[in-house]
Amino acid sequence: MGKKLYRYRTFNSEMINDYSYIHNGVINIEKWKFEAFEGLVFPSSPLYFNDPYDCEFCFQPEVLDCTIERTTYIQLLERKFSLKQDEKNRLLYSDNIERALDIVLQAHGERLSASWKDIILEALSNGMEEIRDAVRVVCLSEVFDSMLMWSHYAQNHTGYCLEYDFSEADMFYKHLYPVVYTKDRYAVSKDEMSNGNTEWIYRSTCRKADVWSYEKEWRIVTANYDKIMAQKQQYTDRKYVLDLRNNVKAFYLGAKSSEEFREEIIRFGKTKRIPVYQMVLSHNSYELKAEKIV
């Protein structure tokens, strides 16, 4: 079975010059048309999401025993005092990093207290920013008629919503993940980080606080190709985009969208035989209804 999902957008009229797979070259176009008409989507960096917890990595205390990022511990301790080479070697090569930290700290009149562990775990989290920035996300929803989603992500109902359909044979289907809503953060374990499996990245990337559950979100999670594959990019100054033109199945116009934008989408929908719906306010309830106009 496939998956039908929706994306709320604004009519961003900023002119952009960017590469189009459809035209096999750089085109000059309004940003909203680049996505709505060209079908090309810019995945977003988690660094700029409105939820401060979104895609932040959280670690179990046992991760201190892990042998990754030993230089992080050294840099952190050297903010407080100078380390001898043998102390650095102990931190770099010890089988038990927690014990090594304790010995080094005692030599400088400190101890590995709970507060020190929190500081180190925070430093580890900060050190994961490079991994976080190597992730790109396309945010989608199971619903097209959410009052809050239209308000938050479609500029107070003045924007539009795209309907996408992803079949199991679609190249993006395997990158689709449902967001898990919970009160607890996903804490990455030592085993997860040491066995070479990257599944923990997706478990962290697709987990949000339950206050966001109204979004009913799914995500396409991909790599930041400009960052990790820059040497393979033909156009190194362009952003990485996803070609979803064949996945677009319908347009939904916001209840407050302007006539100018409505006419453009209706005209395009008629030309491409893509259904267009108008969102309208219910007369007797706090609901949005979709009325087909094309």
Image (cartoon, rainbow, N blue to C red):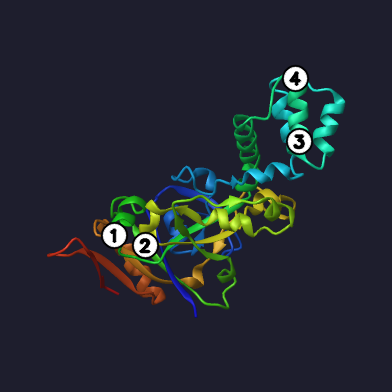
| Closer to viewer: mark 3 or mark 2 | 3
Residue for badge 3: 99
Query: Mark 4–mark 1 contact, CB under 8 Å?
Result: no
Residue found at x 57% / y 74%: 170
Residue projecting furthest to the left: 284
Residue 10 percent across, percent down from the top left:
37, 53
Residue for badge 1: 254
Residue 269 percent across, percent down from the top left:
37, 71
For label 3, the crowd category at 10 Å Cα-Cα, with few meaning under 14, some 14 to 19 and many 20 or more, is some
Residue for badge 2: 161
Instruction: Give above or below for 151 relative to 177.
Output: above
Q: Earlier in the sequence, mark 3 or mark 4?
A: 3
Type of the residue with mark 3: Arg
Type of the residue with mark 2: Cys
Type of the residue with mark 4: His
Type of the residue with mark 1: Gly
Number of on-image labels: 4
Q: Earlier in the sequence, mark 1 or mark 2?
A: 2
4 left or right of 238? left
| Closer to viewer: mark 4 or mark 1 | 4
